[in-house]
């Protein structure tokens, strides 16, 4: 089930909720992201559900993979202090590529 976030809630999202928000924003399913991460068939949905619920916290290298799949700067996923809620949306829409 899709969750609709209101502007004031965006500031308070956990890392897992940010992953879910961005994934839904991109129109991807948990299975699609899990497949790109190379998760095994039986663990696909459960693995992503655990990341999104906060039951598991992805290690730094896995977090970078997730950010790459979701096409966002990794700071959009980390518990990063944005000045305004709109900064989160802007960061999702405009990916900063660092060479």
Image (cartoon, rainbow, N blue to C red):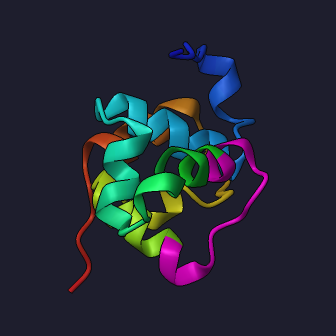
85 left or right, relative to 37:
right
The residue closer to the viewer here, 43 or 81, is: 43
Question: Quadrant where the N terminus lies?
Answer: top right
The answer to whether residue 70 is left or right of residue 99 is right
What's drawn in magenta, residue-wise? 50-62
Task: Tell me the quarter of the image containing the C terminus.
Answer: bottom left
Task: Using the rendered view, name the quadrant where residue 90 is placed.
Answer: top left
- Rendering coords of residue 4 (x, y %): 55, 13
Q: Where in the figure is residue 81, as x and y percent of width and height?
A: 67, 53
> Which residue is rendered at x = 29% and y = 29% of the image?
27
Q: Answer with left or right where residue 96 lies relative to residue 63.
A: left
On the image, the x and y values in percent for residue 39 come to 43, 65
Taking the view exactly as shown, the residue that stands out farthest to the right is: 55
Numbered marks: total: 0
Above or below — where is 18 with respect to 10? below
| In front of the other: 85 or 55 | 55
Residue shown at 58% from the left, 17% from the top = 5
- Residue at position x 58%, y 35% in the image: 84
Q: Is residue 69 magenta?
A: no
Query: Is 59 part of what is drawn in magenta?
Result: yes
Residue at point 50% right, 34% down? 21
- Vertical placement of residue 19 versus 86, above or below: below
Q: Residue furthest front?
A: 42
């Amino acid at each position: 089930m899709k969750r609709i976030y209101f502007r004031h809630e965006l500031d308070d999202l956990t890392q897992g909720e940010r992953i879910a928000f961005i994934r839904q924003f991109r129109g991807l399913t948990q299975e699609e992201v899990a497949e790109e991460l190379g998760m095994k068939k039986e663990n696909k949905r459960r693995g992503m559900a655990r990341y999104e619920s906060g039951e598991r916290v992805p290690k730094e290298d896995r977090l970078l993979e997730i950010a790459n799949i979701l096409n966002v700067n990794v700071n959009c996923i980390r518990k990063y202090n944005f000045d305004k809620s709109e900064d989160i949306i802007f960061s999702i829409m405009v990916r900063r590529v660092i060479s």
